[in-house]
Amino acid sequence: MNSESPLNGKSILVVDDEPDILDAISELLDMCEIHTAGDYDSALDILLNHTFDIVILDIMGVNGFKILEKSVLRGFDTIMLTAHAVTAEALKKSIKLGAVAFLPKDYINEIEEVIRDILLGRDKQFWWRKNLGKESRYFDKKFGQGCKEKDVFFKDFEKSIQDKK
């Protein structure tokens, strides 16, 4: 455990139906206090009875969007982490429901950096600006170069987050 990490002691809930993902995130974020749940009911119980600095949700297998709604209502910064639901529709729904980031599981090793960006005084739109803007390494690679320009929702969203700088 790195006692000098700005994430040291942060309380994080990770919800995923894949035990290996729960283990991987626990190892990557060993400086944090990690709570895990492998299903919707367990996640909801933990979510409603604790306070978290960050909540990390899978989409499929745990009803992640429903948990996202409840997490955002509780005021928790929530990251969507998914493998199978890396689609434009899932991304749009995550944005609309208030997620502060959307990370394909291919980039799980970047979770510490993502959380650090969110927690260290950056505004709620920082991650979206960084990853839907000119450096959109995640989305151009997955959905094709210029995908944001072809979709009115993404064009409008990108404009709205750039205007809030």
Image: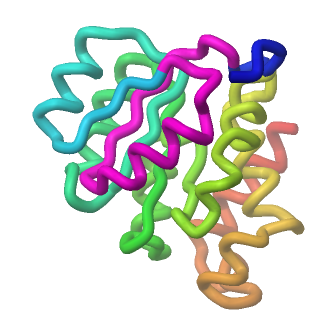
How is the rendered protein coloured? Answer: rainbow
Residue 11: give x, y in percent of width and height: 51, 16
**The N terminus is located in which quarter?**
top right
At a point 66% along the width and 62% down the height, the residue shown is: 156
Q: Which residue is at a point 81% across and 53% down the rendered structure image?
A: 130
Q: Is residue 63 above or below residue 158?
A: above
Q: Quick check: 129 above or below 4?
A: below
Name the residue rendered at 52%, 26% in the picture: 54
The part of the image, by quadrant, that contains residue 84 is: bottom left
Residue in front for this viewpoint, 24 or 55: 24
Image location of residue 107, percent across then percent down: 64, 62
Furthest residue in direction bottom, as rendered: 144
Please give left or right for residue 103 compared with residue 51 in the image. right
Task: Tell whether position 56 is magenta.
Answer: no
> Taking 40 as reference, is 111 left or right?
right
Q: Which residue is depicted at the point 65% across and 85% down?
A: 150
Q: Is residue 17 magenta?
A: yes
Q: Which residues are magenta?
A: 8-33
Q: Nearer the viewer, residue 83 or 77?
A: 83
Residue 75 x %, y %: 45, 18
